Amino acid sequence: MTSRKPPVIRDNTPEEEATIRAAVASDPDTRLLTEEDFKRGWRGRGRPPGRTKERITIRLDKDIVAHFRSLGKGWQSRLNAALREHIEG
């Protein structure tokens, strides 16, 4: 087994930093992130605490799964809502 050297991470040169800042300034859809942005934006892995959902494994007929997946993003939430509607009537 060969050992790998860790990658070398270096700071940007002043020229590279100037190029990056100019590109950010010229793009109306982006901005430089502040320390506050980083503090607010990082939430860690997994679902937020306090959620009432439980992760399970379930086997369903292929056509049922295909139907809900065909509805696009959020198909699992729609499947959950259909089950809830069945239970609550």
Image: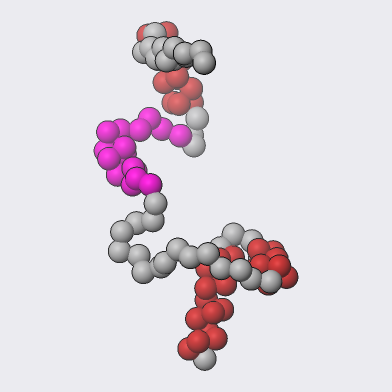
Residue at 38%, 30% in the rendered image: 32
State left or right for residue 76 relative to residue 47.
right
Q: Position of residue 3 (x, y in %)?
A: 47, 13
Q: Position of residue 26 (x, y in %)?
A: 48, 26
Q: Nearer the viewer, residue 21 or 6?
A: 6
Q: Where, by quadrant of the figure, is residue 37 drawn?
A: top left
Q: Is residue 44 magenta?
A: yes
Q: Where, by quadrant of the figure, is residue 8 drawn?
A: top left
Q: How many marks?
A: 0
Residue 67 showing in the rendered view? no
Residue at 42%, 15% in the rendered image: 6
Residue 62 showing in the rendered view? yes
Q: Nearer the viewer, residue 72 or 24?
A: 72
Q: Is residue 42 above or below residue 21?
A: below
Q: Position of residue 49 (x, y in %)?
A: 31, 59
Residue located farthest toward the right when viewing the structure as drawn: 63
Q: Nearer the viewer, residue 54 or 44?
A: 54
Q: Is residue 24 above or below residue 88?
A: above
Q: Where, by quadrant of the figure, is residue 62 drawn?
A: bottom right
Residue located farthest toward the front when viewing the structure as drawn: 1
State left or right for residue 19 relative to residue 61.
left
Residue at 59%, 59% in the rendered image: 73
Q: Is residue 73 above or below residue 52?
A: above
State left or right for residue 26 relative to residue 73.
left
Q: Position of residue 30 (x, y in %)?
A: 46, 34
Query: Which contiguous range is marked in magenta?
Result: 30-45
Judging from the image, the colouring scheme is: secondary structure
